[in-house]
Image (cartoon, helix red, strand yellow):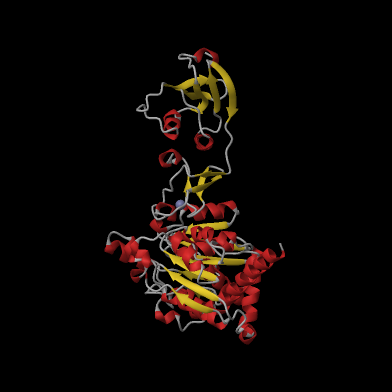
């Protein structure tokens, strides 16, 4: 089965996030803040065979395009992801995610004693490092558990 | 050192460290030459967490340079307890002083403060984070006793919450130093410090007890294990006892081993160590004055140079 045959639910306008590492689809939804209550049409494919990744997840969201900060965080858990913008059933834009140098204002610091968790007028800021992110303020390193600290 | 603030040891290069320590040596050799050098400037001492010694050390260093100091006073009686943000507090204090020394219970506090003010900020300890001015005086002590290359350093005690340890371990990566970390399992180095050590390819080993490495060490840096880190007091007594040294312990040490401690100590170094050739912790504390004078002098010089540049524009 190729990627081509997977268009179970073609969407009219929205975003298809493809080539997500197997098992990360629910984290992708968490990053996008989607839990179903917003009424968007969402379809999720999990552990679908893929030529490039072996197995991949795939998320289709009707009527929603992504902000840059969402894409930035997405890149941390799904570095191979492609983001297809769909308008009138056509792919009008196809982008690979790129890892940013920093993610600002989207993750909360897991260190409860970090100054960013006090009531201060600053955004959180994490440096993207080889296998995770690192708080610019308290230096706490966050690895596999990034999705638990998304704050968008 | 072409820095405006001193926030973490990670920002310090070998050149930065040596420049401050060279200056500290000059200060120690001829304090009179530095007297009154920054007369007419003001330093704010902002201690959101009590620390009489660090505060007095900075106060003394400042006054010897002719710098006047103002003190925020105890946290309980200040507006901090009324919920004012740190960002607001330092912005107000910036108007009163030409530099700020900050001690705060939260990690990252000094980084945040430096983002809101234009005057130099010195981190005098942020929670379990960093304490870089302590590290400069630690390095000065090591340098005066052994030099800073081809060193074997043992760091023992609470490595998890010990901010002086975090800054020292990071700063030592600039030098040819083998580091041995000796602690109970539950108080080993945090992930953030391991990250820095790993990034620099530092030579690091971890141990449960001192015995095996003691004969190799040039420096043994002891820190206190705090009772409040343990839910069970019996467990604390069992652990703390294993990381306590006395004169007998040091029989197995090289003759020129230097024993250091950021002070105050409780009972992790027995008083009989004081009478041995190894004890350097009081000397280390006294080194706070020339080193903090050199640091303040450097940062204020940099700040003045910045102002000069603005005028030229
Ligand atoms: Zn943090």
Counting the numbered discs, the total is: 0
| Residue B12 x, y percent position in the rendering | 60, 62
Residue B300 makes an appearance in the image: yes
* Quarter of the picture holding the C terminus of chain B: bottom right
| Residue B189 x, y percent position in the rendering | 46, 57
Foreground residue among B39 and B25: B39
B219 versus A149 height, above or below: below
Residue at figure coordinates x 60%, y 67% from the top left: B151
Residue B211 makes an appearance in the image: no
B61 versus A129 height, above or below: below
* Quarter of the picture holding the N terminus of chain B: bottom right
Residue at figure coordinates x 37%, y 24% from the top left: A39
Q: Is A132 on the left or on the right of A113, as rendered?
A: right
Where, by quadrant of the figure, is residue A149 drawn?
top left
Where, by quadrant of the figure, is residue B48 drawn?
bottom left
Find the residue positioned furthest to the bottom. B32
Find the residue positioned furthest to the right. B312
Q: Is B32 on the left or on the right of A49, as rendered?
A: right
Where, by quadrant of the figure, is residue B136 drawn?
bottom right
A50 versus B195 height, above or below: above
Residue at figure coordinates x 44%, y 78% from the top left: B247
B282 versus B158 height, above or below: below
Foreground residue among B194 and A9: A9
| Residue B293 x, y percent position in the rendering | 58, 77
| Residue B252 x, y percent position in the rendering | 49, 73
């Amino acid at each position: 089965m190729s990627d081509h045959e997977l268009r179970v639910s073609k969407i009219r306008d929205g975003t298809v996030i493809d080539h997500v590492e197997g098992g990360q689809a629910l984290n992708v939804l968490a990053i996008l803040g989607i839990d179903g209550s917003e009424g968007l049409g969402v379809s999720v494919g999990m552990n679908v065979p893929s030529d490039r990744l072996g197995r991949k997840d795939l998320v289709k969201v009707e009527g929603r395009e992504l902000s840059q900060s969402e894409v930035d965080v997405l890149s941390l858990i799904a570095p191979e992801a492609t983001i297809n913008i769909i308008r009138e059933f056509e792919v009008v834009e196809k982008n690979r995610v790129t890892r940013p140098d920093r993610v600002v204002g989207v993750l909360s610091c897991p260190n409860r004693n970090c100054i960013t968790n006090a009531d201060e007028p600053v955004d959180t800021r994490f440096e993207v490092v080889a296998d995770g992110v690192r708080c610019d303020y308290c230096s706490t390193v966050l690895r596999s558990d990034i999705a638990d600290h998304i704050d968008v | 050192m072409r820095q405006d603030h001193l926030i973490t040891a990670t920002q310090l290069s070998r050149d930065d460290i040596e420049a401050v320590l060279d200056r500290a040596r000059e200060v120690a050799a001829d304090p009179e030459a530095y007297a009154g050098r920054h007369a007419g400037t003001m330093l704010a001492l902002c201690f959101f967490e009590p620390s009489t010694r660090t505060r007095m050390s900075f106060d003394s260093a400042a006054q010897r340079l002719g710098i006047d100091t103002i003190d925020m006073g105890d946290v309980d009686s200040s507006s901090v307890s009324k919920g004012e943000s740190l960002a607001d507090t330092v912005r107000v204090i910036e108007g009163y002083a030409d530099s700020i020394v900050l001690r705060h219970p939260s990690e990252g506090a000094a980084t945040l403060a430096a983002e809101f003010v234009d005057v130099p900020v010195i981190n005098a300890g942020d929670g379990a984070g960093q304490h870089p001015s302590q590290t400069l005086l630690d390095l000065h002590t090591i340098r005066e006793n052994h030099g800073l290359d081809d060193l074997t350093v043992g760091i023992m005690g609470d490595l998890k919450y010990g901010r002086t340890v975090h800054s020292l371990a990071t700063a030592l990566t600039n030098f040819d130093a083998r580091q041995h970390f000796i602690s109970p399992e539950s108080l080993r180095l945090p992930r953030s410090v391991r990250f820095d050590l790993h990034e620099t390819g530092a030579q690091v080993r971890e141990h449960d007890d001192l015995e095996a490495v003691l004969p190799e060490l040039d420096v043994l840096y002891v820190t206190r294990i705090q009772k409040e880190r343990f839910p069970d007091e019996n467990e604390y007594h069992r652990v703390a006892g294993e990381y306590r040294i006395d004169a007998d312990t040091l029989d197995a040490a090289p003759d020129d081993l230097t024993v250091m401690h950021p002070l105050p100590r409780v009972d992790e170094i027995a008083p009989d160590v004081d009478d041995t050739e190894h004890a350097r912790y009081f000397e280390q504390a006294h080194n706070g004055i020339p080193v903090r004078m050199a640091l303040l002098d450097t940062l204020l010089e940099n700040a003045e140079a910045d102002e000069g540049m603005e005028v030229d524009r």
